[in-house]
Image (cartoon, grey):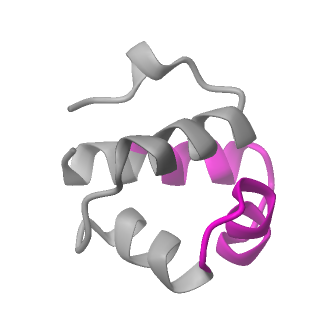
Amino acid sequence: MSSKAGQVFKDGRIAKGLTQLQLAKKAGIYPNTYAKIERGEQDPSFATVKKLAKALDLDLKDIPD
């Protein structure tokens, strides 16, 4: 993953009108973990990418490696 993935998640989150905390809860991940992913400080596992994509109604193919 890359910081580009974090930007995709951030853009999706904002488009849905969600806070970082709301998205983290919806995806079932720790809020701190999500914040680091969004800032590009942490690479998410594939399982986490799937959870975030599902929570944001994104297609996995639209998330950069």
- Left/right of residue 9 with respect to residue 15 in the rendered view: left
Q: Which residue is drawn at 33% across and 43% down?
A: 5
x, y percent for residue 42: 26, 69
Residue extending furthest toward the front: 47
What residue do we see at 68% from left, 33% from top?
54
Given residues 16 and 45, the one toward you in this image is 45
Residue 55 to residue 58: above or below: below
**Does 63 appear above or below 26?**
above
Q: Relative to residue 35, is residue 51 drawn left or right?
A: right
**Count of marks overlaid on the render:** 0
Q: Residue, x 46% and y 76% (percent of image)?
A: 33
Residue 16 found in image quarter:
top right
16, above or below 3, in the image: above
Answer with the quarter of the image where residue 40 lies: bottom left
Q: In this view, does 17 lie to the left or right of 23?
A: right
Quadrant location, the N terminus: top left
Where residue 34 appears, as percent x and y from the top left, is: 50, 70
Residue at the location (20% across, 32% down)? 65
Q: Verify whether residue 4 appears in magenta.
A: no
Q: Give the range drawn in magenta.
A: 8-30
Expressed as whole percent of the image width and height from the top left, the position of residue 56 reads: 69, 38
Closest to the observer, 49 or 38: 49
Q: Please tell me whether the stretch drawn in magenta is mainly helix, strand or loop.
A: helix
In x, y percent, where is residue 52?
59, 46
Q: In this view, does 65 lie above or below 41?
A: above
31 relative position to 2: left or right: right
